[in-house]
Amino acid sequence: MITVTQKALKVPVMVRHWFQPATTPGFYYLIYHTVSNRLRLELDLPYGLFQRQLAYLARHRRVISYDQALAGLQGGRPPAEDTFVLTFDDGFEDFYSHVFPLLVKYKLPATLFVTTGFVESGTPYPLLPRRAPDLRPVSWAMLANMVDSGLVTLGAHTHTHPNLVDQPAERVMAELAAPIEIMRRRLGVTVRHFAYPRALWHERLEPMVAQFYASAVIGDGQKAQSQGFQPYRIPRLPIRRSDGWLFFLAKTRGWLDDEERLYDRLRRMKTAPRR
């Protein structure tokens, strides 16, 4: 459940930001998961709130594709203003039924990072069996339809969604390779980008990821900028249920970057590789 404390903690983070110097414009890669409103978890947004957020981004902010942003970052071309990239993880069915129609309505590009084992199974999401016994994946036909629209690009989110930090090299390589082969066979697409499950990454994984993908996204919550850009550590900014409307606006202005940096560090400390 979302607590008052979670919202209250955002306030001092915003206040601290107001006393910091302005930053150079960059690219915010936003993370969404599901808009089913059935989980009551931070990763699950009410549909009405999500629709309002997309309408705001379409009307008042600049939204471009993942590849357009990557080209700008690699070419050392900072945007004139903070620019946004929409990314979604896992591949829930509501991406097709709820999210995709809004992308079409507002003509917004997005990247969906697919957990291919989840889609192949066609069964409810295995990591949340009690909370979401009917939270099913998209089908291959749904994915094909969205790819054909030209608005949705597919990325890889491993095959079974493990914490790669804890896995031996052989398992990591298999998890990285499987989505490329499966989506090529099922959809005829070439998958070029990767998202770490639960945004958990480690330096030792990067050479393995680089064998398969042109880039990879993590958590961190910061905007991506050309200076010091690392293509296998592209930061993303999670949009949380506790953000509501006003804190979402604050996030799009960079006022809550420090909150996500703290979340990312705590998450990585808890899941550091065992020695």
Image: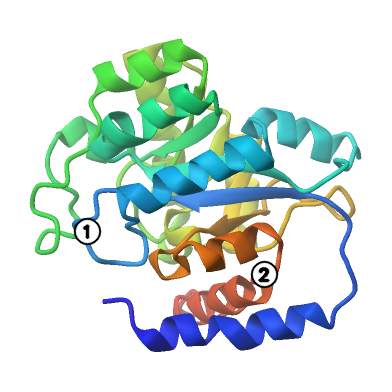
Q: Position of residue 189 (x, y in %)?
A: 47, 16
Residue 211 seen: no
The answer to whether residue 21 is above or below residue 103 is below
- Amino acid type of the residue tagged 2 in the rendering: Asp
Element assignment for label 2: helix
Q: Position of residue 86 (x, y in %)?
A: 55, 41
Quadrant of the rendered structure where residue 188 is?
top left
Q: Which residue is mark 2?
A: 257
Q: Residue 164: x percent and y percent?
A: 44, 58
Residue 108, by quadrant, is top right
Give the crowd class for mark 1: few <14, some 14-19, many >=20 residues within 10 Å.
few
Closer to the camera in the image, 145 or 165: 145
Residue hosting label 1: 127
Residue 21 bears which disc, if any?
Answer: none
| Relative image position of residue 45 (x, y in whole percent) | 35, 56
Q: Residue at x 80, y 50 (%)?
A: 26
Q: Quadrant of the N terminus?
A: bottom left
